[in-house]
Amino acid sequence: MVFEKIAEMLAEKVDCDVSEIKGDTKFADLGIDSLDITELLMNIEDEFGIEVEMDTSLVDVNALVAKIEALTAEK
């Protein structure tokens, strides 16, 4: 569920088909920069009701999904 929601958000952000977003898709390959990631994290915080801090480990979709799943498990 987390992956699907993130994939939808990314596909909307970069205007591509959601099927193009894979777990190992790097944000840089989508043309997403640090400002875009910050905006995405704010949207994720609203969507999942968690607080996500930006860090250098967030380079691809899998890393972001793992972070969100860990944070939601703590709730």
Image (spheres, grey):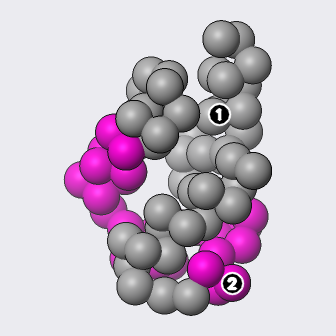
Query: Is residue 10 in view from this perspective?
Result: yes
The residue closer to the viewer here, 58 or 69, is: 69
Q: Which sits earlier in the primary sequence, circle 1 or circle 2?
A: 2
Q: Residue at x 61, y 80 (%)?
A: 18
Q: Residue at x 30, y 58 (%)?
A: 36
Q: Residue at x 33, y 39 (%)?
A: 42
What x and y, as percent, mark residue 3? 70, 55
What x and y, as percent, mark residue 50? 50, 23
Q: Give the range drawn in magenta.
A: 18-43
**Which label was assigned to residue 19?**
2
Q: Residue at x 63, y 34 (%)?
A: 68
Position of 55 with respect to 8 (left or right) is left
Q: What element carries label 2?
A: helix
Position of 56 with respect to 25 (left or right) is left
CA–CA distance in space, label 1 to label 2: 22 Å
Magenta-drawn stretch contains 48: no
State the residue position of label 1.
67
Counting other residues with Cα less than 10 Å from the Cα at mark 1, is it few (<14), some (14-19), or many (20 or more)?
Answer: some
- Seen in the picture, residue 9 relative to 57 is either above or below; the reply is below
**Which label was assigned to residue 32?**
none
Query: Is residue 55 in view from this perspective?
Result: no
Position of 22 with respect to 10 (left or right) is right
